[in-house]
């Protein structure tokens, strides 16, 4: 599988787990080959199975609204799922189904080499950050085995519960700043230190002009927004569980 199109072709004919038996269409994923941003959901639902495209039902509409809120459209990003065929009755994908399908997502990630991976919900988050609850890790950038991972709660959860919706919107709003920082960081080393010190190639919006790069990465939380779904304060995060080897918590 040397191209994303080829991955999609192989996925469409795959029978490597039992999910193939119930599908109308496999849903390999879609987006430009050069997308900087990769979203990883859980698995196709009813509408996705019918159309063979990811996130085209209600959760997809919400995802499109979220993208619009940061000035992006879905044709600028790559959208994939942990499993490419719909689990019956939208049940959770099983560990063996996820294992059977992971070779496709692995290859998609290699071929895309995205600047930032946004994991939507607990299944895709667990692929990079196992054993931690999504409510604990969401909204904070991590580096995992050389990839930048930003976990967010699943849009479908936001459709069910208003406080989750607010948390998702809050986390989503951080994406443009993260991309700016990661773009600067990925520039050739000869330019890197200079840019990092002066912030020269970072174009702040007026409200960001007096803020440091660090403020953009980890914006100060407003005092009054004390919802239960907020990520714990950094101090709390730091003590009990240091990231395992290969992982680095960036903030
Ligand atoms: N939910 C997902 O996780 N993926 C989709 O493609 C659609 C809904
Ligand atoms: Fe193949 Fe993945 Fe579909 Fe299972 S879910 S049949 S591994 S493409």
Image: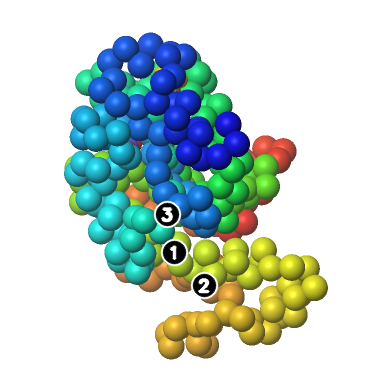
**In the rendered image, which quarter contains the N terminus?**
top right
**In the rendered image, which quarter contains the C terminus?**
bottom right
Report how far apart the C-alphas of labels 3 and 2 lie in the structure. Answer: 22 Å
- For this rendering, which residue is in front, 248 or 78? 78
Q: Which residue is mark 1?
A: 174
| Picture residue at 41% right of the left edge, 34% below the top | 28
**Disc number at residue 216?**
2
Q: Is 242 rendered above or below residue 6?
A: below
Instruction: Judge whether residue 240 can be spotted in this image.
Output: no
| Picture residue at 42% right of the left edge, 49% below the top | 31
- For this rendering, which residue is in front, 236 or 17? 17
In the rendered view, does 66 fall on the left or right side of 183? left
Q: Which residue is mark 3?
A: 77
Whether label 3 touches label 2, CB < 8 Å? no
| Sequence-first tag of 1 and 2 | 1
Report how far apart the C-alphas of labels 1 and 2 lie in the structure. Answer: 8 Å
């Amino acid at each position: 599988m040397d191209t994303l199109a080829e991955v999609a072709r192989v996925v469409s004919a795959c029978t490597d787990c039992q999910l193939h038996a119930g599908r109308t269409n496999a849903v390999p994923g879609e987006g430009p080959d050069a997308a900087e941003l990769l979203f990883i959901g859980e698995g196709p639902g009813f509408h996705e199975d019918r159309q063979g495209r990811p996130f085209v039902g209600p959760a997809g509409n919400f995802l499109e609204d979220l993208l619009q809120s940061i000035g992006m459209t879905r044709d600028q990003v790559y959208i994939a799922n942990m499993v490419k065929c719909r689990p019956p009755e939208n049940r959770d994908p099983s560990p063996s189904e996820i294992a059977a399908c992971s070779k496709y997502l692995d290859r998609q990630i290699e071929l895309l080499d995205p600047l930032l991976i946004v994991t939507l919900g607990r299944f895709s988050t667990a692929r990079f950050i196992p054993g931690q609850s999504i409510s604990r890790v969401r909204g904070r950038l991590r580096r995992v085995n050389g990839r930048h991972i930003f976990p967010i709660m699943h849009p479908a959860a936001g459709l069910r519960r208003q406080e989750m919706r607010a948390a998702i919107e809050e986390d989503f709003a951080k994406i443009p700043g993260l991309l700016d920082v990661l773009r600067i960081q990925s520039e050739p080393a000869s330019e890197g230190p200079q840019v990092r010190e002066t912030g020269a190639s970072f174009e702040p919006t007026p409200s960001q002009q007096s803020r440091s790069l660090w403020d953009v990465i980890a914006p100060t939380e407003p005092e009054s927004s004390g919802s239960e779904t907020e990520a714990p304060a950094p101090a709390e995060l730091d003590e009990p569980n240091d990231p395992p080897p290969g992982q680095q918590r960036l903030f």
